[in-house]
Amino acid sequence: MKDEHEFLDNLMQVCNSAKREERFAAVAHASTIIRSTQGLIPIGREVNNHVHTTYSFSPYEPAAAVCAARKAALAVVGSVDHESIGAAEELLDASKAFGLVGTVGFEVRASFADSPFFDRKINNPDSRGIAYMCVHGIPRNKLPEAEAFLLPLRKARFERNTQQVERLNQLLSKADVDTIDFQGDIVRRSRWDEKGTITERHILAALVEKLVQSCGDRNSLLSLLRDRFSVKVDPKQESLVLDSANPFFLYDMLGLLKSQFLDRFFIQPTAEETPDVRAVADIARSIGAIAAYAYLGDVKTSVTGDKKPENFEDAFLDQLIAFIAEIGIPAVTYMPPRNTISQIRRVQQLCQKHDLMQISGVDINSPRQSFGCPQLLQKDSAHLIDSAWALAAHERLSDQDAAWGLFHHDNPYRGLPLDQRIALYARWARQCNPFEIESICVLAQRSLKK
């Protein structure tokens, strides 16, 4: 092919169609081309297990996320949506069609009210005593059980969202800005009817639309933000807002408003929306998945532009990781691009001390972000690539037999140290043809017989 990137760019538009049947047709076409073309972008070494899709908030449909991952030459790509597993089936099918390895999971906010950290900001900028947790590596046959756990959380969040929009509308009315119609401006544009989640970003996106409509031009928009809403806009943000050719305008505005305006209408989540952290560990264990604490670390400069400089769990990280391990959470997930080398080394040392799996991914929810993570290519991060491959093996093997789960008490390799078990699973996954990833079960059985 003359231009493999051009092929994927053109395919991306169809893979990002709002119509599922069009996306599926694009995936089928991609599979035919990729299988028959030797020169298409080769698979690299980088991985990403933390991609959000339209089923929470993201510019990417599941198939488009896989297409973007293929263009970035990723070897493994994983979806992690807030309170939703709606993207999972499509992402797995698209990954196989594109010759990638897919993994699936979800992200929830968990309560630490019954813990020594009940009054601390842990890894959540909006709440004390509530932390983001990920559940990775869900076997495909357990997706319905995951959905049963997530549905009540989504419903509780939906009710809180309606209340947040009511509070926001009061602010907009006072500023002579058109108010937001929750159903028409938010629900209709979400994946709510397809097991998706509505997040604060959905609300902020509707807010941006109303502000633009009310102001008419970008200079007036900046004046409104500064004069009526007391939002501080630095020179870099101002240039992005004023640039009429900026293709990422919406997402740049979301970052600005999330860091400086969200707290004006934000309502703290209830217990119905934030299960106890132990319950998250329990559901992950019951469905053969892997619960992981999501390390954030103190923020000096926000990579994604949606967080203020602020301290989080670094001051009590030793105690927190010890607590995580004590209550049966087997993994920690973190994002190398967001942290300093010293932060990452500290997390790695604590994980090794407590025998915890380390999972990495770049939190993708904006078109400005790169799917790749070159930091993983550094020598001291090779184990994170192994973990991504091992997750893929864990999912396929657990789908066939729960005992093959990495942390299952009847795992035939339970006697191996964790790092060796992960390396073994990663090796099996790498040896498989990604178009026939299920063949990993054959490799595992052969290894066991030896």
Image: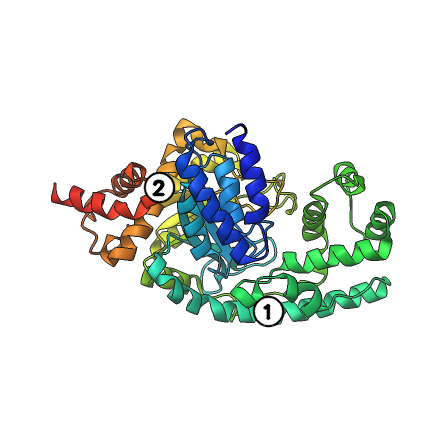
Query: At 52% from the left edge and 46% from the top edge, which residue is drawn?
Result: 65
Quarter of the image where the C terminus is located: top left
Q: Residues within 10 Å of mark 1 (few under 14, many from 20)?
A: some
- Coloring scheme of the render? rainbow
The one nearer the camera, 215 or 232, is: 215
In the rendered view, does 429 fall on the left or right side of 131? left
Residue that numbered label 2 is attached to: 434
Give the CA separation, mark 2 to mark 1: 38 Å
Q: Quadrant of residue 182?
A: bottom right
Identify the secondary structure beneath mark 2: helix
Identify the secondary structure beneath mark 1: helix
The one nearer the camera, 61 or 332, is: 61
Looking at the picture, which amino acid does disc 1 mark?
Answer: Phe
Tag count in the figure? Answer: 2
- Please provide percent x and percent y for residue 203: 68, 60
- Residue at the left extreme, as displayed: 450
- Please provide percent x and percent y for residue 245: 76, 39
Residue 190 visible here: yes
Looking at the picture, which amino acid does disc 2 mark?
Answer: Pro
Q: Quadrant of residue 188?
A: bottom right
What label sits on residue 158 in the rendered view?
Answer: 1
Q: Residues within 10 Å of mark 2 (few under 14, many from 20)?
A: many
- Please provide percent x and percent y for residue 97: 42, 45
Which of pointers 2 and 1 lies earlier in the amino acid sequence? Answer: 1
Residue 294 visible here: no
In the rendered view, does 154 fall on the left or right side of 277? right
Q: Quadrant of residue 206?
A: bottom right
Asked if the residue under mark 1 is in contact with the one under mark 2, i.e. CB atoms within 8 Å, the reply is: no
Query: At 69% from the left edge and 50% from the top edge, which residue is drawn?
Result: 254
Q: Nearer the viewer, mark 2 or mark 1?
A: 2
